[in-house]
Amino acid sequence: MQSLWMVAAAFLFACMGVCVKLAAEAGYSPAEIVFYRNAIALALMSASMLWGRLDPRTPHWKFQIYRGVSGFISLMLYFYAIAWLPLATAVTLNYTSPLFLALFLAGLSGARLPASLVGALVAGFAGVVLLLQPTFHEDQLAGGLMGLASGVLAGLAYYNVRELGQKGEPEWRTVFYFSLLSTLGAGLWMLFFRFHPLTLRGAGLLLGVGIFATLAQLAMTRAYSRGRTLVAASLAYTAVVFASLFGMLFWGEVLSLAAWLAIAIIVLSGMAATRFSRANPAEQD
């Protein structure tokens, strides 16, 4: 049941994506959206910690820095990839993160990965590719490398989330430090872009980005720290399903038969990963 937190995180990330898309259509730059996303999350987490008198000090500050820096750089590269590539291509490259997470688990922690479980992950990624139908051109090589690097660093960030969870670090503290480091990084990033004044609608959209992102980060952190790591990675693909449905609802996007087939592959890969994970004693709750 802990892995179902990733489904909740995927839904919330999709809601955040709707707000991001609307904010971009309103004229806000990626740098501004990233900054407000993290600044709002930092404010919410700080208020929650003050209210609950929670201690921000951590004995695992190195892992917090690794998670925060890798997560922020991944986010930065992802937004650059979105600016330079078709959106479908950038999203697909970023969604290679679960595959790289499996490699980090095998290489850094020595975890044994059953072939059936890795196969389910690969099937899920194939479904994402089929759904988004990315295309490459020679003049998009730099953007493609940035998108792929965002997937690698996101996988590393999720690995550090897992390590922090196993060391007993609470979810709220991990989200707090990620928000803090990302806010500082995004603030520096914004110095190179033009500021846009906040309108009532724009402020509402950016507030939605921050709130949905904070809730999604909490749910995702709980999924990776307390659930089966690779099952949670597989279920992360459901964000594409939610995003597709939101696209139909808000922008009238009509899904083709191939798109619905891709959604089926993604859902079935998550179910298969759950089954294969239960068969592996090392992944039992």
Image (spheres, rainbow, N blue to C red):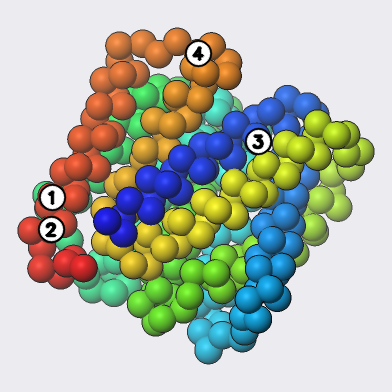
Quadrant location, the C terminus: bottom left
Task: Look at mark 2 in the image and give the residue it sits on.
Answer: 278
Residue ID at (31%, 55%) = 3
Task: Look at mark 3 in the image and give the residue it sits on.
Answer: 20
Mark 1 secondary-structure assignment:
helix
How crowded is the residue under tag 4: few (<14 C-alpha within 10 Å), some, or many (20+)? few
Residue contact between numbered discs 3 and 2, judged by CB atoms under 8 Å: no
Q: Is residue 10 above or below residue 268?
A: below
Quadrant location, the N terminus: bottom left
How crowded is the residue under tag 3: few (<14 C-alpha within 10 Å), some, or many (20+)? many
Between marks 3 and 2, how big is the CA–CA gap?
Answer: 36 Å
Q: Is residue 285 above or below residue 269?
A: below
Which numbered disc covers residue 275? 1
Residue type, mark 1 in image: Arg
Task: Look at mark 4 in the image and give the residue it sits on.
Answer: 253
Residue ID at (37%, 59%) = 223
Query: For the view shown, which residue lies furthest in the right direction?
Result: 197
Residue ID at (43%, 38%) = 239
The mark tally for this picture is: 4
| Residue 162 found in image quarter | bottom left
Looking at the image, which is closer to me, 31 or 202? Answer: 202
